[in-house]
Amino acid sequence: MQSSLIGKIEKAKRYAEEPERVKFSQFRLSFHGGHKDHNVSFDDGILNCDCNFFASWNTCSHTMGLERMLGVMMPRLSTARVG
């Protein structure tokens, strides 16, 4: 293996151990819930979910679980209802 590639692999390992280096700005995903799949999105600091609970509370188990999974990679979140 070339030394330059070995250096990149080592750097990638260090980066993977420092998730605070990454901040999400936008994404969409399907969250496989207990009863069905839900669409979750994050855009410009606003997290949304299409589940009924989120529509009433502006938070839900899907968004809270996602925040726990992504930890320090998520900026401080706002929530908004799905339109």
Image (cartoon, helix red, strand yellow):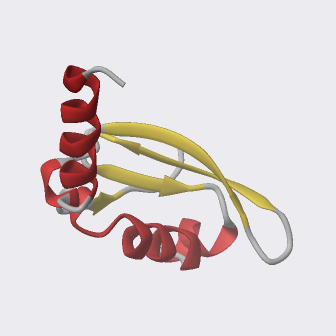
Q: Is residue 36 above or below residue 41?
A: below
Observer-nearest of 4 and 40: 4
Q: Is residue 33 above or below residue 38?
A: below
The residue positioned 62% from the left and 75% from the top of the image is: 53
Looking at the image, residue 63 sits to the left or right of residue 35; the answer is: left
- The residue closer to the viewer here, 30 or 12, is 12
Q: Is residue 38 left or right of residue 7?
A: right
Q: Residue at x 19, y 56 (%)?
A: 75
The picture places residue 60, in percent across and down from the top left corner, at 53, 76
Q: Could you tell me residue 12's position as x and y percent? A: 26, 42
Figure quadrant of the N terminus? top left
Image height of 34 relative to 14, above or below: below
Residue 14: x and y, percent?
Answer: 18, 53
Image coords of residue 34 (percent x, y): 80, 77
| Residue at x 15%, y 59% (from the top left corner) | 20
Answer with left or right where residue 26 lies relative to residue 34: left
Please identify the residue farthest to the left as the structure is shown: 21
47 sits left or right of 50 in the view: left
- Residue at left 17%, top 59%? 18
